[in-house]
Image (cartoon, rainbow, N blue to C red):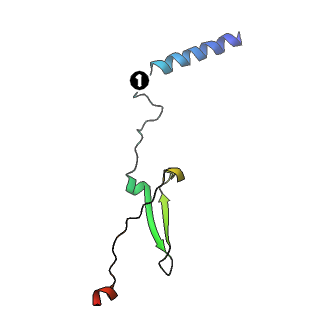
Amino acid sequence: MLRHINLIFILLFLSLSSSASDSFSFYDEKESFLPVEEAFQFSLLTDKDESIINIEVNNARGYYTYKDKFKVAIKPCLLYTSDAADE
């Protein structure tokens, strides 16, 4: 008897879940995502010699940074210091 009741509940659940539309949700609010600039905030930190640059990533709550998806590229550029400008 108990087996039959369990089977009825399983079939009822499956029929309800298959007939649910895409807009159906158990939550009242829709998922919304933060803009990238708010979800992932970056800081560049240098050592006292400015020979090492550390990148600090601060994620908003519920957001994650995956190491295999994180890429850093440095574009070469010419730097002019005040000493070079005086010459």
* Residue 77 horizontal/vertical position (percent): 34, 70
Residue at the (43%, 54%) spot, across then down:
39
* Residue 8 horizontal/vertical position (percent): 60, 12
Is 26 above or below relative to 64?
Answer: above
Seen as rendered, the residue at the extreme bottom is 87
**Left or right of residue 65, residue 8 in this image:** right
Closer to the camera, 73 or 35? 73
Q: Quadrant of residue 73 in the image? A: bottom left
Is 9 above or below relative to 47?
Answer: above
Closer to the camera, 24 or 64? 64
Where is mark 1, residue-wise?
21
Residue at the (49%, 60%) spot, across then down:
58
Is 15 above or below relative to 27?
Answer: above
**Which image quarter holds the N terminus?**
top right
Closer to the camera, 45 or 53? 53
**Left or right of residue 63, residue 36 in this image:** left
Q: Label 1 is placed on what type of residue?
A: Ser
Closer to the camera, 66 or 82? 82
* Residue 83 horizontal/vertical position (percent): 34, 88
Look at the numbered disc 1 and give the secondary structure of its residue. loop
**Which image quarter holds the C terminus?**
bottom left
Please rate how many residues cluster around mark 1, counting C-alpha atoms within 10 Å: few if below 14, some from 14 to 19, many from 20. Answer: few
**Left or right of residue 2, residue 78 in this image:** left
* Residue 61 horizontal/vertical position (percent): 50, 53
Is 19 above or below relative to 64?
Answer: above
How many numbered tags mark residues here?
Answer: 1
Residue at the (49%, 81%) spot, across then down:
49
